[in-house]
Amino acid sequence: MTGKNIQLDKNGNLKHFLSIEGLSQPLLHTILNYAESFATVDKRPVKKVPLLRGKTIANLFFEPSTRTRTTFELAAKRLSADILNLNISTSATSKGEILSDTLRTLEAMHCDMFVVRHANSGAAHYIASQVAPHISVINAGDGRHEHPTQAMLDMFTIKQHKKDFTKLSVAIVGDILHSRVARSEIHALNVLGTNEVRIIGPHTLIPKEIEKLGVHIYHDMNSGLKDVDVVVMLRLQRERMRGALLPSEDEYFKRYGLTNQKLKHAKKDAIVMHPGPINRGVEIDSDVADGKHSVILQQVSHGIAIRMAIMAMVMGQINRDENKEKKK
Amino acid sequence: MRISMENGKLLDPANKLDQKQDLFIADGKIVSLEKKPDDFNPDLVINAKDKIVLPGLVDLCARLREPGFEKKGNFDSELYAANSSGITSISVPPDTTPVIDTPAVVEFIHQRARETNRANIFPLGALTQKLKGEQLAEMYLLKEAGCIGVSNALNAIENTEVLRRAFEYANSCDLSVFIYAEDEKIANNGVAHEGAISARLGLPAIPETAETIAISRVLLLVEQTDVRVHFCHLSSARAVDLIRTAKKQGIEVTADVSICNLHLTDMDIADYDSNCHVKPPLRNERDRVGLIEGIRDETISAVCSDHQPHEINAKSAPFSITEPGASTIEHLLPLMLHLVNRNEITLNRAISLITSEPAKILGINRGFIEKNKHADLCIYDPNSNISIDKNNLLSSGKNTPFNGWELQGKVTHTLLNGEVVFSID
Amino acid sequence: MTEKIDINVLIENMAENISSHCGTQGYKNPLMIGIQRGGVWIAARLHQKLKLADPLGELNIAFYRDDFSKIGIHPEVKPSKLSINLDDRHIILVDDVLHTGRTIRAAMNEIFDYGRPASISLAILVERSGRELPIHPDIIGKTITLKEGEHAKLSGPEPLALEIMKSG
């Protein structure tokens, strides 16, 4: 694309974490490696390291999400940072002036990092383009665009079970159209060299020309799940049933809900993932969600280590360049 | 005021003028196109050596933001910006606040036009009251007050019965209807063309069918009601096809395209550049080429600026909640010349698209150079460059999607009714 | 300029000194922890020679460095490995070079996040000048004097070699 990648500083180090798109394979591997180390922290008597002591992180949630906010909060606390939770109602920020006022106020409070969740695609990019240079921005989900930390924790989970991405077939099932998780996963899987990325869903939930992101499109589960190593089920928002996108939960479950029966088409050792929260009986059967293929709970615990790794990386890069210059 | 314009090259496709020729103006009119009339003592001599003299440009659609949106722009700022691009006649859509659905608002606009005295302003009246698509506006009274056509601006008319009756009634008032064709339901609050870019960026998307379904509906009603319809701002190649076919079948409609859609595509949105949030959306390169093709074969007969200045805050937000529209009026001419430089259209065609053709659509007596007619003129230097810097725009709206572009062709003088309203010195 | 030092002799001496240090202090069954990476190499040799019962602990101090905000995170962080409960244990902390003392401070901070040991003794292969914190080793392989701009670097794990080199 034409614009420069504002995620990286002039030396190619991570400054903001906004989207998987635009990040290199080595960088994604570095994140996964760091997360490996950080994963040991919560197995210790004192579940805390002093890495970000004295730093202030603001959770800017323009769209409520207790789960995501909590994992970022825990990750920040385990890095010894101070964390500020702000739930800002979107009605108050429909105007740009109020959004930029909020940012200026937080900058004046000497925040070092914003973790941003927003209902509009591109919000994290926008905020990153507006903040003072010492501030890093982490995207905790922007509209239908990306949810890059979720994708990284899913990659981490896959890596624990499958090692080599280049031999894997991964199927992402459900509401691709509205899913920021799906977009981030598609990019992450492709950057990591996954053999085949499939998406499965009805035409109404698959955006036009999505194949240009490097996916194969399937409209039925039996052929879509055939011989896959990983199945990623997406959450189906109940409000999608009200429009013209889907007729009913029952019909959706019959066609696209993951059951043990449908899972038989996948490889014997396939793993099943879900970003949560699960709608049991809508996109996934309880037998599968709690079954031996499911790694859904592992995903949740990996979420903290991944977010610690990313927070440490974006904060650690600041001043690095100047320091290098000085040494020379 | 007497002005003699010497050594310039006159270019007026409507009158097949394309030669070095002097021109003499007195009392607002062109008094001679050949030799200096006897006892002509000019108050001003403009030396147009190495420059090109055009008819003053006619912009089919520009928002001057009065009344109602003065924080975005006003007649003084926007018309000065227009003059800097050689524009002397402008048609303004009715989506002001209050809406142009009463003679009082028309009178207000005329009064502001007289006060600023920088361009001929041709308001379009509302097609339905408050543009709500429910009840017909007082079209006859609006016409009496000076509206040269009617339009529902960017607001859809969902009820086809209302649209049919509005067409019939406009026809009986002998008014042209200016239609922005978009099916609001299928556009579904989208902000970008449905395709690879909107899929990648996760932006709510507007399918091509939002435009083509709406155009088809209007074409069928035109066939039935025989009203004169002009389609505003086509955006897709398929839309051009529909109109091309209809014209071949004898349905007399006209169409224009906004200058943005001739230069930009959805690729230009890049990482959410809100200045590329426009309506109709920027579509893909195939569509852009289709629009150019439509210009070449005269399916499309005019190019407008579709100027929409915005205050900074309207564009400072995540892409989909920014306001659509681009500030374009002061670059209309150089952007047209750019198409010529890229060999996409000829110079003659480029000039007629922004002079005589839009004048014909509006039914106004402007957009040409003729003896004893209004001296609305634009002089530009084809060898002088401009570089677009969003911080140095004359318009109040700094929301140009062309920031950083280098273009050829700089307007040096603009004359309205024989008076110099803009000159670079 | 480089100067070769026989590390095997130094480690032999250190092992003896640790034994007698623990004897005089009355430390029974000490727990050995090496600091990654060089400290772990030295500690592994000592651990073998002393035939300690508990497995060797490995400490990665990347998350505890006080210069994090200046130099960022180390590109090759490996997790710390401390599987044994540290509470009330006597710890022998091992590192290759003692310079400013900041690494040792960070290591002690980390150790206290794992538990409350009875004592910590510090064993160092090479002690050099330049201390910035009040930290003194209990067991020293060798004390060296470095000129300005020189630093000592251990390479390993096999073979172990210490080099004195001009920096920059």
Image (cartoon, rainbow, N blue to C red):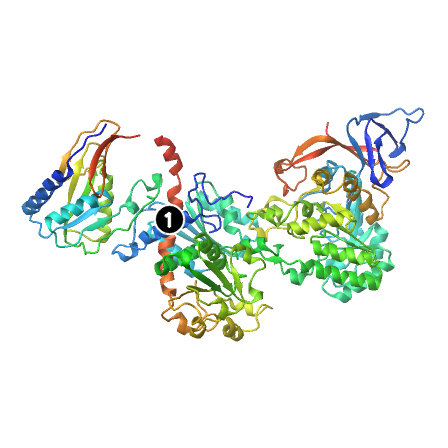
- Residue A88: horizontal and vertical position, in percent? 49, 55
Q: Residue under label 1, please give it.
A: A30
Q: Residues within 10 Å of mark 1 (few under 14, many from 20)?
A: some
- Provide the chain ID for the residue under circle 1: A
Q: Is residue A125 shown left or right of residue B74?
A: left
- Residue B181: horizontal and vertical position, in percent? 72, 57
- Image quarter of residue B157: bottom right
Residue at 68% from the left image edge and 39% from the top image edge:
B395
- Could you say whether the residue bearing mark 1 is in a helix, strand or loop? helix
Residue B389 appearing in the image:
yes
- Quadrant of the frame with the N terminus of chain B: top right
The three-letter code of the residue at mark 1 reads Thr
Q: Is residue B415 shown left or right of residue B37?
A: left
Residue B126 appearing in the image:
no
- Image quarter of residue A284: bottom left
- Quadrant of the frame with the C terminus of chain B: top right
- A169 in relation to C117, above or below: below
